[in-house]
Amino acid sequence: MHPSEPTDEQRLRAALLRGGNRSVVTGLWALRRHGLQRIPEPDDVHLLTPHAREVTSAGFALIERTTRLPNPLLRDGVPIAPVHRAVLDGARRLRDFDTVQAMLAEAVQRRRCTPEQLDRELSLGSQRGSAIPRRALQAILNGAESVAEADAWEIWKLSELPAAEWNVSVFDRDGSFISKPDAWCEDVAFAWEIDSRGYHEGGDHYAATLARNARYSAAGIVCLQTLPSRLRTEPGVVITELRDTYAAACARPRPLVTCRP
């Protein structure tokens, strides 16, 4: 008979025993405990331990000695690193850009940490493996809150149009809320929405999208809707559409609308 494989909980507890006192779980295992969902399946249990401790990795326990041991949070008795530290410790060991982008975006979108916390941690932490998370963070620092918005941010840069604001709230002349477009050009009141077919065609979401578009029209706002898939399959066409729509917005008097973060 062969002994059964240890459960995830058993692996976690065994790794903590290996790390010893003051060890902190970080990376993907910590993100799972924080409740984040857009992460790969964890493998080795990544632990942070005091730098002075002479303990090495063994089996599924990945030991990282550090002089920057974070103050842990307890989840079911397990000491885990704060999200901003855990997500970057995990990201440094991944090689897929989209996966890293999704992890960082979810952490910020769900208000588990701020872009500024990620930027500071990336600067203070190990530079090994930092190239991908550093690139992924740029769009988030500029306001993108999802992988699609990060793709859109890259496309907007290539369009050479004036800088846009991301995820700001737009109001009409009476102060009534209109919408929160993915990208917004304040100078000409131009909104860009990255609308996924699956989300916006379903029931209440479809009705909400129609109502949003009606508010844009009533306020005189020029709006361009783009499928997220086209940001990668037709970037050149999307750039042309952005430039043409921006030109159309410039050609009419700017409506009396305002934006706020």
Image (spheres, helix red, strand yellow):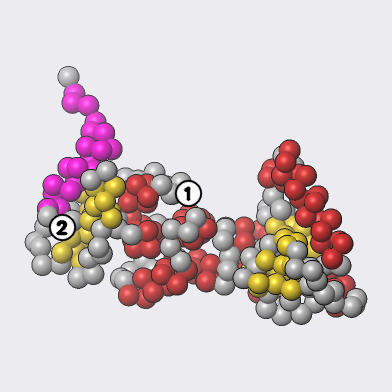
Q: Which residue is mark 1?
A: 38
Tally of marks: 2
Q: Which residue is mark 2?
A: 22
Position of residue 154 in the picture relative to residue 159 (left or right): left
Residue 90 got which mark? Answer: none
Q: SS of the residue at dot 1?
A: loop
The three-letter code of the residue at mark 1 reads Arg
The image quarter in which residue 253 lies: bottom right
Residue sitting nearer the eye, 67 or 35: 35
- Does 4 lie within the magenta span? yes
The three-letter code of the residue at mark 2 reads Arg
* Residue at left offset 38%, top offset 63%: 84
Compare marks 2 and 1 and give the one earlier in the sequence: 2
Quadrant, the N terminus: top left
Residue sitting nearer the eye, 154 or 87: 87
Q: Residues within 10 Å of mark 1 (few under 14, many from 20)?
A: some
Q: Position of residue 213 (x, y in %)?
A: 81, 56
Position of residue 19 in the picture relative to residue 178 (left or right): left
* Residue at left offset 18%, top offset 23%: 2
Residue sitting nearer the eye, 185 or 233: 185
The image quarter in which residue 53 lies: bottom left
The residue most toward the top is 1
Q: Predominant secondary structure in magenta?
A: helix
The residue most toward the front is 174
Magenta-highlighted residues? 2-20
Position of residue 160 in the picture relative to residue 46 (left or right): right
The image quarter in which residue 173 lies: bottom right
